[in-house]
Amino acid sequence: MIIKNAEIVDIHGRRKGDILVKDGIVADTDFKGNYEDHQIIDGLNYTLMPSFIDMHTHLRDPGFEYKEDMETGMRAALKGGYTHLAAMANTNPITDNMDMVVENLSKSKELNLCDFTQICALTKDFEEEFVDLEKIIAVTKVFSNDGKTVVGENTMREGLKLSKEFGFLLATHCEPEVEVVKRDLNILREMPGNLHICHVSEKETLNLIRKAKREGLRFTCEVTPHHVFGNDIDYKVSPPFGTKADRQALIEGIKDGTIDLCATDHAPHSKEDKEKGSPGISNIEVAFSMYWKVFYEENIPLGKLSQMMSYEPAKLLDLNCGEIVVDREANLVLIDENRESTIDIKDFVSKSNNNPFHGRKAKGKVVMTIKRGEIKYDNR
Ligand code: DOR
Ligand code: ZN
Ligand code: ZN
């Protein structure tokens, strides 16, 4: 495959060059050879970026398939430009054992849509007893009780200790946010651990994180499209929408590197479940356009967004992609970066369209998603 004439944007900035893909791998980023006998994709007027990697998705599989299942979630993700998803464990039953992790991993292989990380619960049934970490680290390196806070301070301390010992990442949902983040950073001050803080949303949390990073503590954190895109919105999501000052603080945190990466927290729910108060937003199909609207208006370059949507999550999940460089996997997305887009929940391919931004203007559109040289979504 050759992708020609596109503008290339990734963490390394903006440039031109024709991309040669061989056996699913980027073989050349400035190809000048013979174009015959190749599948040619004309990227003229488009921007080619590394496809996106979502550290934080809810696929609802198994148990809540009426909200989403692995297939619909992955199709929605490909439409949004994602080729790798890390799915949270708050399924029904909770994904807290080897068999369930293995089952979902093999299901994702069969589907052959997105690449996949199944996150395993840290504790059995999200209570206080640890899952069989020693065994399960053979099949996943990410553990999280997302949806629920690790309430016990000692459980958190022990979990972080084990994360270092076994070499896994512990992703946390923190409620109340400031208090729990403060607690966890204090634990990290006592001893190292592999901590990733999910969906940071408050100004005060950002200040804690910035200070801790300046001290030299090592950990990562993420934001969601909805907290970066909107504030003071009356729509149930966890953590809740913040104020204008909170949102501004997130933007500052993106600009100064306090925030490591952009996830989605794609959280599909049925209409009935939303009416009963389930928190969450279905957003993976429009996440890029939501982020890009804000980044563009704040004069943050697209390369920085690429770093936060592809490069950093690839690093954290230890994937051979996330930048357009020779020998990396050809996981790519073609974007119309200047296209005005409007968020339209009627266009969603996700089973759920719980999203409060219907009708709002966003920026840019995903036109093609390529995984290891294979076109997985095409809407040129
Ligand atoms: O809004 C949210 N929805 N936040 C969470 O932490 C859980 C998620 C869900 O699973 O619906
Ligand atoms: Zn959460
Ligand atoms: Zn979540």
Image (cartoon, helix red, strand yellow):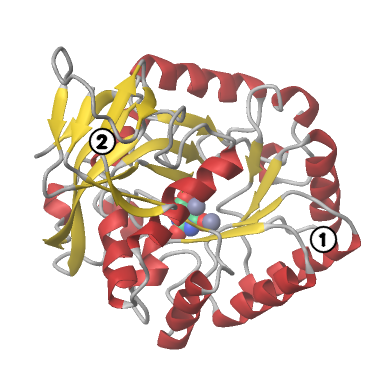
- Which residue type carries mark 2? Thr
- Which residue type carries mark 1? Leu
Residue at horizontal 63 percent and vertical 57 percent from the top:
220
Among the two numbered marks 2 and 1 on one chain, the one whose residue lies closer to the N terminus: 1
Taking the image as drawn, is residue 265 in sight?
no
Taking the image as drawn, is residue 237 in sight?
yes
Under circle 1, the secondary element is helix
CB of residue at label 1: within 8 Å of ligand 2? no
Q: Nearer the viewer, mark 2 or mark 1?
A: 2
Q: CA distance from mark 2 to mark 1?
A: 38 Å
Q: Who is closer to the viewer here, 255 or 248?
A: 255
Q: Which mark is residue 369?
A: 2
Depicted 214 relative to depicted 285: above or below: below
Q: Position of residue 268 (x, y in %)?
A: 35, 48
Q: Which mark is residue 188?
A: 1
- Residue 266 placement, left or right of 155: left
Q: Who is closer to the viewer here, 90 or 232?
A: 232
Under circle 2, the secondary element is strand
Q: Who is closer to the viewer here, 249 or 323?
A: 323
Count residues near mark 2 (Cα–Cα under 10 Å), then give few for <14, some for 14-19, many for 20+: many
- Residue 177 placement, left or right of 53: right
Q: Quadrant of residue 2?
A: top left
Residue at horizontal 44 percent and vertical 82 percent from the top:
248
Q: Position of residue 100 (x, y in %)?
A: 57, 23
Q: Who is closer to the viewer here, 59 or 371?
A: 371
Please state, as top left, top right, bottom left or bottom right, where the C terminus lies in the image: top left
Depicted 99 relative to depicted 347: above or below: above
Depicted 203 relative to depicted 331: above or below: below
Q: Position of residue 20 (x, y in %)?
A: 29, 26
Q: Position of residue 158 (x, y in %)?
A: 86, 48
